[in-house]
Amino acid sequence: MKKKLSIFLALVFTTGVFAQKNNIFIGVGPSTAFTFNSNFKKPLGINFNMRYGVSSLSAITAKIEYFGVKPDYQSQISSATIFNFKFGFLSYIRNSNFLGQLETGISNYNYKYTATSSKITGFVAGAGLGYSFKINEHNAIDLLPVFNYVQRDATISKTWLNINLNYRVNLNFK
């Protein structure tokens, strides 16, 4: 058991920080959101993300986010969940730890009423500016606020500010 734990820790703490070309990174962490046109409390959730480096400072990204939400007031809605699946592009700004990201994908709201449930699925687009805190030469914690806009049809749209905190690891062990 000690040997397996030692190997795992050695791999975790000897991987890469910037989105270097051809490197694959994964990240996981908590998320919260501040909604602008909703009657729900602040959602809490988790996000999983992956990056594939296409240059020394940029990467193509994929992200899955899941949030649980409670209503602000007594209503027929007892709870809701939000599930987002997004692809995007991320780049570090001028070789610093600041980064920008653009992403797009699908957002799915599931509302649970006292007797039934309903779904709202729509197109989501987001843009964010964040900072990457170096842990060591190869790992980082990313703080990335992303402004999101979801459009279901001509009459239903939602906006919110997502705040993601991720521990990121490079999967290319060299």
Image (spheres, rainbow, N blue to C red):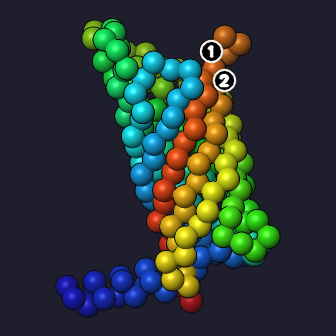
Quarter of the image for residue 106 reads top right
Return the x and y of residue 116 as percentages of the image width and height.
Answer: 33, 11
Counting other residues with Cα less than 10 Å from the Cα at mark 2, is it few (<14), some (14-19), or many (20 or more)?
some
The circle drawn on residue 95 is none
Q: What element carries label 2?
A: strand
Reply above or below: 82 against 94. above
Q: Mark 2 points at which residue?
A: 151
How far, Cα to Cα, is label 1 from label 2? 6 Å
- For the point 45% across and 83% down, the residue is 13
Kindly tell me whether residue 10 is visible in this rendering.
yes
Return the x and y of residue 75 as percentages of the image width and height.
Answer: 34, 9
Q: What element carries label 1?
A: loop
Q: Which residue lies furthest to the left in this view?
A: 1
**Badges 1 and 2: C-beta atoms under 8 Å apart?**
yes
- For the point 42% across and 33% down, the residue is 42
Q: Tell me the amino acid under the disc marked 1.
A: Ile
Quarter of the image for residue 172 reads bottom right
Locate residue 23 relative to residue 42 in the image: left or right: right
Locate residue 164 relative to residue 78 in the image: left or right: right
- For the point 62% across and 15% down, the residue is 156
The residue closer to the viewer here, 60 or 76, is 76
Return the x and y of residue 16 as percentages of the image width and height.
Answer: 58, 80
- For the point 69% across and 61% down, the residue is 99
Locate residue 17 relative to residue 7 in the image: left or right: right
Return the x and y of residue 109 as percentages of the image width and height.
Answer: 48, 26
Compare marks 1 and 2 and give the one earlier in the sequence. 2
Kindly tell me whether residue 122 is visible in this rendering.
no
Counting other residues with Cα less than 10 Å from the Cα at mark 1, is it few (<14), some (14-19), or many (20 or more)?
few
The circle drawn on residue 156 is 1
